[in-house]
Amino acid sequence: MAAYSEITIEQYSDFSTNLSIDTDQGDNFNLSSFSVSSQIRKSYYSQTYYILDASITDAANGTIYLSMPSANTANIEPGRYVYDVVIDGPSKIRIIEGIVTVLPGVTR
């Protein structure tokens, strides 16, 4: 079952966060043979989506970096969204899911 995590993105600002992935036993999840991807959608059924740039920064210790530049956050309407992070390798696993809150920006 995917872990749950909420994130906040400020519209018109660069966004980034590091996520540490653990096994059910609490050990670091070795991501050496995996790639990673992530999307944001208004609902689980929305056809429109926004890509969260996802990369593995420390495979042995299960660290994933998510980011989105300000040019892309500017295109997301403020509100609540859903997201997930999927790793793909020997198997495809949804490892994190949750809510994204996009806060409106004033200065553009």
Image: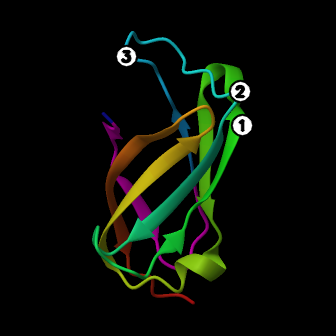
The answer to whether residue 90 is left or right of residue 39 is right
Q: Do tag 2 and tag 3 residues touch (Cβ < 8 Å)?
A: no
**Which residue is at 39% across, 85% downward?**
77
**Which residue is at 50% across, 29% downward?**
21
- Residue 64 location in percent, x, y? 60, 39
How many residues crowd around disc 3 within 10 Å: few (fewer than 14), some, or many (20 or more)?
few
**Which residue is at 46% across, 76% downward?**
49
Q: What residue type is disc 1 on?
A: Thr
Q: For numbered disc 3, what is the local secondary structure?
A: loop
Q: Do tag 3 and tag 1 residues touch (Cβ < 8 Å)?
A: no
Image height check: is 83 above or below 69?
above
Q: Quadrant location of residue 43?
A: bottom left
> Mark 2 sits on what residue?
32
Image height check: is 23 above or below 63?
above
Q: For numbered disc 2, what is the local secondary structure?
A: loop
- Give the CA distance from mark 3 to mark 1: 21 Å
Mark found first going from the N terminus, 2 or 3: 3
How many residues crowd around disc 2 within 10 Å: few (fewer than 14), some, or many (20 or more)?
few
Q: What residue type is disc 2 on?
A: Ser
Nearest to the eye among marks 1 and 2: give it: 2
Nearest to the eye among marks 3 and 1: give it: 3
Q: For numbered disc 1, what is the local secondary structure?
A: strand
Image height check: is 20 above or below 48?
above
> Mark 1 sits on what residue?
57
- Give the CA distance from mark 1 to mark 2: 10 Å
Q: Which residues are magenta?
A: 2-16
The answer to whether residue 88 is left or right of residue 79 is right
The image's mark for residue 24 is: 3
Q: Between residues 29 and 17, which one lies in front from this camera angle?
A: 29
Q: Give the quadrant of the C terminus.
A: bottom right
Q: Between residues 94 and 83, which one lies in front from this camera angle?
A: 94
Q: What residue type is disc 3 on?
A: Asp
